[in-house]
Image: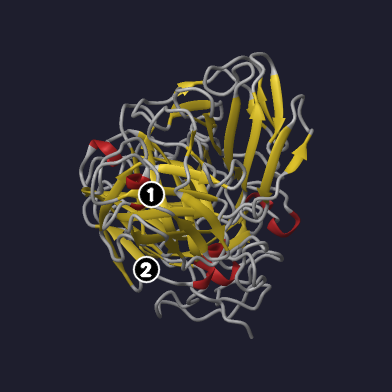
Amino acid sequence: MASSGNFSTMNPLHYTSTNVQYSNGNLTFSPNSSWSETTFTRNNMVIPKDKKIYFEVYYKTQSGYYAMHGLSAVNATPTSAQSGSTGTIIIYNDSTRINGTRTDGVVTAASQGDVIGIAIDGSNNKVWFAVNNTWQISGDPANGTNEIGTITTNDTVGHDITAAFNQNSVSSLTVNFGQDSTFGGEITAGGNADGNGFGDFKYAPPTGFLALSSANLSVSADIDPAQTDDDYPSKQFDTVLYTGNASTNNISNLNFKPDLVWIKIRNTASNAVLVDSSRGTNKMVHPNHPQAEVTTANLTSFNSDGFSLDGTSDYQANYNGNSNTYVAWCWRANGGTEATNNDGTGTSYVQANQAAGFSITRYTGTGSALTVGHGLAQEPEFTIIKDRDASVNWIVYTKIIDGSLDYFFLNTTASKADSGLTGPNSSIWNFNSASSYSNTSSRNYIMYNWHSVEGYSKFGTYVGNYNTDGAFIYTGFRPRMLFVKRSDAVNSWFVWDTARTTSNKMNSYLYWDSSNAEETGYAIDVLSNGFKLRGQNNATNNSGGTFIYGAWGDVPFKYNNTF
C-alpha cells in the first residue's frame, strides 16, 4: 500500500491571542487561560479545493459545553468568544454559527466522551456535522445533501479553509485527521480507512471523503516531481548566487534555461537589473527605477543551466562588478520562443509556461481601450508592467486584496490604489482606458504575468498582528523565494530566499523598490508548508495591516521535505 504521508495536526505556529497548550503530538489542545476571542486554533493544512475531507473531534474534557469546533476561512475570526463570523461554520453547544448567523436547536449538543465527525466538500465549501456517527439535520455528505451550511469565502476572509477550534481553559479536545481512532488511548479503535486506504477513523468516512494527509494533497500534474522529469518546481524557478569578476562570467547550477533573470547586488547599494529572452539579452531595465529600457552587452546569453555575463559595459556594477556578490532570481518561460497572440483587440507577442503559470508578453499601447492576450490558461493574479520607452514607474496589478483590480508601483513604497481598469480574465488583459504606466499610445511595453500553481507558487494576503509570534501563512510548498508588501500603508517590497539564508530564522532581505544592499532585521521562518512572520514591526507585521505576498517553491508539501 502506498504511504499515507503525514496527517495534519494542529498548528502551534498559528498565533492565538491566548496561549494554547498542545499535547499528544499536537492533536490534543486546550487554552491555558480563557477563551481566545480574536483567533481560532487552527490546523497545519488547508482543505484542498478538489477534495472532500473528513476528520473527527473527541470531547476529552468539557465544562458547560464551552467548546466550539468547525471550519474557517484563513482570515476569518470569531466576532466574540462564542460566535463565528463570515467565512466560518462552527458548532457551539447545540447551536450553529453559519457565516456569523446563529441558529439554535438544529444539532445535538455534544457531551464529554462524544466523537464529532466533520465533513467538507472543498469544491463548494459545503459542511456537515455528525455526533457519534449520526449526521445532523439528516445530512448526507456522500450524496451532497442536507448540509449544515456553506462557508462564504471572498478576498477579505480568504479562500483557503482550515479546521478551527475554540474552547475555555477547562475544556480539552482531541482531533483525529486519520492518525489514531483511539484519540490517544481514550476510546476503542474504529479501524476505518478512507477510500484511498489511508487513515484510522472511529467511524467510516462518508463515501468519497478522504483523510487530510499529505498523500491526499493536490499537486499540479504539470509540476509534480512524481509525474514529470522535465517540469518540477526547481526546473521552473530557482535562485542562484555568484561573485562578479568584471570579465567573462558563466553563471550555472540552474536546472533549466532561464527566460527572466532578475539580478540584485548584495554587498553594496546599486540598481537591480532585469533581462528577459523576449526583449533580448542586451535589453536591460532597472526594476527599482523608472528609467526606460537601456541597451547594454552585460548579459551575453541564456544557457541551458544559467546565463553568461561580460564586464565591459557602463552597467557592469549592476551585473558583474569585480568581487561584488549577487543574487539572481530566475524563471523559465518558453525558451525565448514567442507566439503571436490575437486574442485581444491588439496584437501581443507571448512566450508562456502553462505548467508554471508564467508568461512574458510584449505589446504596444494605444492610449484608448485595448485588450491583449496574455497567453495563460487562467487569469493572472500578479502582473508587472514596464513602459520600455519612457522613464515612468513600473506598475503592479493584482485582484488578490479585495477582488477589484488594485495597483502598486514596483519601484516605490506607495500603498495600493484602485486602478479603475477591468484587468485580466482567463485569456486577455483589458486596458479599458489610457494609462501612462501601461497603455500610452505608441509606447512599447513588457508584461510579466503569474498565477498560483498548486504545490509550486502562491499569491495571497495576510493580516499582521504586531506580535513577536506573527502570522503563519500556508502555501502548500517550501518557499524558495518570497516577497511581502504592505498594501494599506507606505512600505517597501521585501524579498527573502533560501539561497542567501540557509536556516531559520531568515532575517536577510533585499528590497525590490530600492538600490540598497542586503539588510538584516525583519525575520521569517521558511517551513515545509509555508512561512511564519517573526518580529514586532510595522513593515511586515503591523497589527491589523493587510499585506500581499508571493512565493515560488522548490518542494511541494506533499513530499514532506523540511527546510
Q: Is residue 320 left or right of residue 190?
A: left
Q: Position of residue 179 (x, y in %)?
A: 48, 75
The answer to which of 505 and 312 lies nearer the viewer is 312
Out of 348 and 176, give the one closest to the viewer: 348
Q: Is residue 187 above or below residue 140?
A: below
Number of the front mark, 2 or 1: 1
Q: Which residue is mark 2?
A: 563
* Residue 546 visible, this angle: yes
Report helix, strand or loop for mark 2: loop
> For the residue carrying disc 1, how many other residues have a C-alpha within 10 Å: few (<14), some (14-19), or many (20+)?
many
Q: How far from the left and from the top, in percent, is residue 129? A: 57, 55
Residue at mark 1: 319
Which part of the image, by quadrant, shows the C terminus?
bottom left
Q: Is residue 264 left or right of residue 394?
A: left
Density class for disc 2 (Cα within 10 Å; few <14, some 14-19, many ≥20) is some
> For the view shown, which residue lies furthest in the right direction?
342
Real-space Cα distance between discs 2 and 1? Answer: 29 Å
Q: Position of residue 153 (x, y in %)?
A: 56, 39
Q: Is residue 72 above or below residue 110?
A: above
- Pick the front one: 489 or 104: 489
Q: Which mark is residue 513?
A: none
The image quadrant that residue 349 belongs to is top right
33 or 230, nearer to the observer: 230
Image quarter where the N terminus lies is bottom right
Residue 62 appears anywhere in the view: no
**Nearer-N-terminus badge (2/1):** 1
The kind of residue on which mark 2 rests is Phe
Residue, x 31% and y 36% (percent of image)? 514
